[in-house]
């Protein structure tokens, strides 16, 4: 028998029970649409997290001296020659949009003190020209200005630090840290700009000063890190590989953001697992919808399947018809679900979902400040995976009813009254 | 199992059972629906099986039709022992060599009269044009012309049973098994249906085996086999 006959029979059986088919397809399509939407939202949300995280931190790709990540010590730093080699390698790695934004920092943990108080802080010696487009902090300016290229004793500080140290714009305060000579050295700086992120840890504990000032104060050439900012976190793997190939110096360690910011990476992963659970529940609902629909139709049509077998359909072919019914339902639902999912994701929420209504103040998580507006992100691979997953669930859920139909007792099923 | 094997069975009995048993395992005791039954039906016979309810008529038809397997013994259809065939070979025998007419008609509700009747040909892969022509010829023969597009729900009981007969014979099977085909029909309709089947038997040489309680069927049968408690009580040729 030609298999198209079985397909035709299955198609006819699906279409005959239009209401059942529509209800089943609707449940599946809605599930798939939710899946497409939730994955787009999750991807968009994660990308926002990563973007905010790398801008508050050191970039998508970070180059440091080995051991600096663990020690945080200025002694574990890159030399000026190594920084030059890194910059050449960055330019050398082929990239569609040209060399990425980079920034060079000399960072140290120290103390900020005024006449009234003192607080432990992270002091970042930065290049003001590159930092403006790289870092999250200049965009959070609330008073004054960000550092400029010819600044020397300027400092950019958070509102928390200003408040705790009793500072204001133009105030002077001292930053103190251990220099490369082992001595505790102080540096007088003046507040030229004040930022507010809403994250206490940053607002009280972060100070930007010009990198030249930091170098001379600490007696340290080179940098503690060179960061690269990419358009998208999906670029990281390729660029990282290219850089690692070009920087074989054992005194240089090239890391992705996930290695450099393990807390952020863990937060993304935890959220991923939450999504997986949500998706598993969705898959379960969809599987039950298909299973229920196809199995009920088998139980309801026992006599009919008996007749089909009496007329010459084999048990296997009968099972195939039932299986194909499930597959067809899944296929219809898949197409509708993808269209519906794309429509709700980009038709209604292309500009993002604003969660600020549910939040008071800033939205921070895992030590980073997040934008309360999450913009869904389209990824073909996610769409294809979602459609495949739903297809697989539909196919698996059709197996049991098909096996059930195969094992019908033909003579007994002919007695079945509908 | 293939068509050639069946074709070569010409001249052999249409049906033969040898020490045939069908036992249903039930508590407290198994039910012996058919007991050591030996029966031979020649090609072209028009045979009725009568007997009280529970005498094993339907079970015997199901075993002969390959819808259920015998517990013991042999069942031959057109020279092929079907009791031990694989499922797919049995399905092929049913498709190509046996037609069924059921008491409850058992038409497929979503198909039109024409589609129901042509269904066995569709399963065989007969081209649409040929299917249509063969069914239309049959419909004309048995008085169903003009009703081709009606679904079973819009046909009378007699019309539905005639569609079922058309479905049973359209593939020109060697054997038609009919389980109480007139039970749900009024007298006139039942007689008309018997006319149709008798004519097909006469003109096409199709072997008919009925199970029935209907005296009209018994009267018109060329041979009457009476079953009691799964055994042949009487086998009368006319």
Image (spheres, coloured by chain):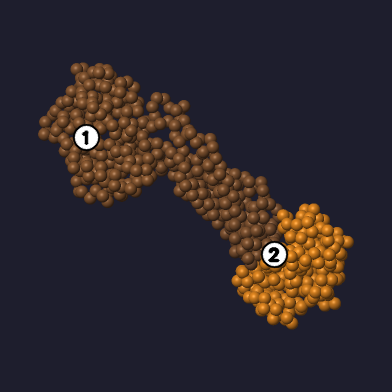
Residue B146 in the figure: left or right of residue A344: right
- Residues beneath discs 2 and 1 located on the same chain: no
Q: Hey, which quadrant is residue A315 in on the image?
A: bottom right
Dot 1: element? strand
Give the residue at x 83% y 58%. Answer: B146
Q: Hey, which quadrant is residue B106 in on the image?
A: bottom right
Colour chain A appears in: brown
Give the residue at x 17% y 25%. Answer: A187
Dot 2: element? helix
In percent of width and height, residue B222 lies at 83, 75
In percent of width and height, residue A344 lies at 54, 38
Give the residue at x 54% y 37%. Answer: A347
Colour chain B appears in: orange
Mark identifier at residue A106: 1
Give the residue at x 19% y 29%. Answer: A213
**Can residue B119 be spotted in the picture?**
yes
Residue A273 vertical placement versus B82 (above, below) = above
Question: Pointer 1: residues within 10 angstroms few (<14), some, or many (20+)?
Answer: many
Going by the picture, which residue comes out furthest to the bottom?
Answer: B11
Mark identifier at residue B44: none
Q: Chain of mark 1?
A: A
In percent of width and height, residue B87 lies at 61, 69
Q: Quadrant of the N terminus of chain A?
A: bottom right
Residue A143 in the figure: left or right of residue A307: left
Mark identifier at residue B122: 2
């Amino acid at each position: 028998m030609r298999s198209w006959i079985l397909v035709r029979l299955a198609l006819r059986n699906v279409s005959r029970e239009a209401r059942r088919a529509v209800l089943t397809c609707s449940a599946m399509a809605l599930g798939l649409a939710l899946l497409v939407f939730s994955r787009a939202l999750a991807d968009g949300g994660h990308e926002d997290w990563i973007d905010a995280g790398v801008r508050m931190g050191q970039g998508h790709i970070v180059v440091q001296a080995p051991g600096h990540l663990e020690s945080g010590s200025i002694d574990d730093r890159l030399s000026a020659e190594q920084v030059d080699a890194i910059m050449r390698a960055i330019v050398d790695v082929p990239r569609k949009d040209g060399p990425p934004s980079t920034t060079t920092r000399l960072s140290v943990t120290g103390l900020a003190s005024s006449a009234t108080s003192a607080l432990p802080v992270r002091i970042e010696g930065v290049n003001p020209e590159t930092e403006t487009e790289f870092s999250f902090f200049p965009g959070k300016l609330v008073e004054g200005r960000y550092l400029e290229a010819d600044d020397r004793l300027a400092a950019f500080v958070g509102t928390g630090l200003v408040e705790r140290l009793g500072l204001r714009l133009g105030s002077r305060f001292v930053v103190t840290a251990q220099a490369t000579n082992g001595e505790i050295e102080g540096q007088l700086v003046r507040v030229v700009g004040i930022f507010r992120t809403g994250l206490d840890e940053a607002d009280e504990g972060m100070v930007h000063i010009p990198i030249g000032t930091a170098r001379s104060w600490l007696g340290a050439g080179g940098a503690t890190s060179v960061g690269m900012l990419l358009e998208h976190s999906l670029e990281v793997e390729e660029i990282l590989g290219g850089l690692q190939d070009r920087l074989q110096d054992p005194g240089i360690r090239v890391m992705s953001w996930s290695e450099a910011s393990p807390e952020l990476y863990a937060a993304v992963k935890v959220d991923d697992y939450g999504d997986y659970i949500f998706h598993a529940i969705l898959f379960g609902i969809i599987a039950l919808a298909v299973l229920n629909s196809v199995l009920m139709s088998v139980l309801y049509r026992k006599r009919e399947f008996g007749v089909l077998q009496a007329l010459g359909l084999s048990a296997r072919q009968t099972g195939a018809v039932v299986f194909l019914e499930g597959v067809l339902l899944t296929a219809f639902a898949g197409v509708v679900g993808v269209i519906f999912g794309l429509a709700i994701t980009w038709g209604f929420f292309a500009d993002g979902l604003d969660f600020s209504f549910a939040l008071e103040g800033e939205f921070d998580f895992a030590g980073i400040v997040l934008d309360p507006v999450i913009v869904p992100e389209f990824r073909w691979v996610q769409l294809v995976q979602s459609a495949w997953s739903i297809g697989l669930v539909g196919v698996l859920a059709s197996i049991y009813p098909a096996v059930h139909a195969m094992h019908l007792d033909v003579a007994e099923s002919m007695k079945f009254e509908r | 199992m293939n068509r050639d094997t069946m074709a070569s069975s010409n001249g052999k009995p249409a049906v033969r059972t040898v020490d045939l048993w069908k036992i249903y395992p039930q508590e407290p005791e198994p039910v012996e629906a058919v007991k050591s039954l030996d029966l031979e039906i020649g090609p072209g016979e028009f045979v009725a099986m009568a007997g009280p309810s529970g005498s094993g008529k339907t079970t015997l038809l199901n075993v002969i039709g390959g819808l259920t397997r015998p517990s013991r013994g042999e069942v031959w259809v057109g020279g092929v022992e079907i009791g031990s065939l694989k499922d797919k070979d049995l399905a092929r025998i049913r498709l190509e060599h046996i037609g069924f007419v059921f008491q409850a008609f058992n038409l497929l509700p979503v198909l039109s009269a024409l589609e129901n009747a042509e269904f066995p040909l569709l399963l065989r892969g007969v081209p649409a044009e040929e299917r249509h022509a063969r069914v239309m010829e049959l419909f004309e023969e048995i008085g169903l012309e003009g009703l081709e597009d009606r679904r079973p729900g819009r046909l009378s009981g007699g019309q539905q049973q005639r569609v079922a007969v058309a479905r049973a014979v359209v593939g020109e099977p060697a054997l038609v098994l009919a389980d109480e085909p007139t039970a749900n029909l009024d007298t006139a309709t039942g007689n008309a249906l018997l006319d149709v089947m008798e004519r097909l038997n006469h003109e096409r040489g199709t072997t008919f085996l009925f199970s029935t309680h209907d005296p009209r069927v018994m009267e018109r049968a060329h041979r009457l086999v009476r079953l009691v408690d799964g055994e042949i009580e009487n086998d009368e040729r006319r």
